Amino acid sequence: MSLTNMKFKILPRPHDLSGEELRAHWAYKNFGLQGDSIVAFRGLFDVPHELWIDLDPTIQKSDIHSADMLHFVVEHFNSTLRETLLRQYILVSILEEKLLHRMSDVEHRLVRLGEDLFDGENRLTVTAAGSTPVSNKLHLGIYIDPEFLKGVHGLKAYNIKALELAEIVINQYRAEMRRLEEKSWRIRAIT
């Protein structure tokens, strides 16, 4: 399926991330979104350690506590894991840009380190990317409530509404994916 037709959905009611969302065809089975898709929703991060797809937090015994987050779950077919990792960087960069445009307080120091965002020393996002037998998936979670004692920042500190931000990020991500495909159509072979 063409990325030009990337399907999307924003869930109006809370939905906790359980790990099931990272299985192949989750968006199709639950919402009829066939092909490449992006789904956003607000809810707890409630994924057991044994289902985490990024091994570093598991090995380091990191604690991604069950926090209220804005979640993005993306599925791409006909792509490699490396392409999906690059798309993960694109999605996080879009989020960074959209947050910076909406931040009114000069006290905030938003920084992207790899595929995660921080405000100063405080983590704002968690991300992961992985492969299923038929597709590649990525997850981006953005904390809602700041918990500075746990080293976590959140969207409430910026007075940004989660689902409104989700719509803006999704629209930009779909546009970027469309541009990538359109650009590939007009590039001639080097001979």
Image (cartoon, rainbow, N blue to C red):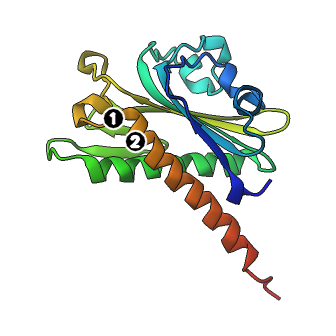
Residue 28 vertical placement versus 60 (above, below) = below
106 vs 163, nearest the viewer: 163
Residue 113 vertical placement versus 16 (above, below) = below
Q: Residue at x 84, y 37 (%)?
A: 134
Residue 3 vertical placement versus 36 (above, below) = below
**Residue bearing the label numbered 2:** 165
Relative image position of residue 72 (x, y in whole percent): 54, 35
Is 21 positioned to the left or the right of 10 in the image?
right
Is 153 positioned to the left or the right of 71 in the image?
left
SS at badge 1: loop
Residue 27 vertical placement versus 175 (above, below) = above
Marks 1 & 2, CB-CB < 8 Å contact: yes
The part of the image, by quadrant, that contains residue 131 is: top right
Looking at numbered disc 2 in the image, what kind of residue is underneath it?
Leu
Which image quarter is the C terminus in? bottom right
Relative image position of residue 171 (x, y in whole percent): 52, 52
At label 2, counting other C-alpha atoms closer than 10 Å, the crowd grade (few under 14, some 14-19, many 20 or more) is some
At label 1, counting other C-alpha atoms closer than 10 Å, the crowd grade (few under 14, some 14-19, many 20 or more) is few
Q: Residue at x 31, y 29 (%)?
A: 154
59 vs 39, nearest the viewer: 39
Q: Distance between the residues labelled 1 and 2?
A: 6 Å
SS at badge 2: helix
The part of the image, by quadrant, that contains residue 30 is: top right
168 vs 69, nearest the viewer: 168
**Residue bearing the label numbered 1:** 161
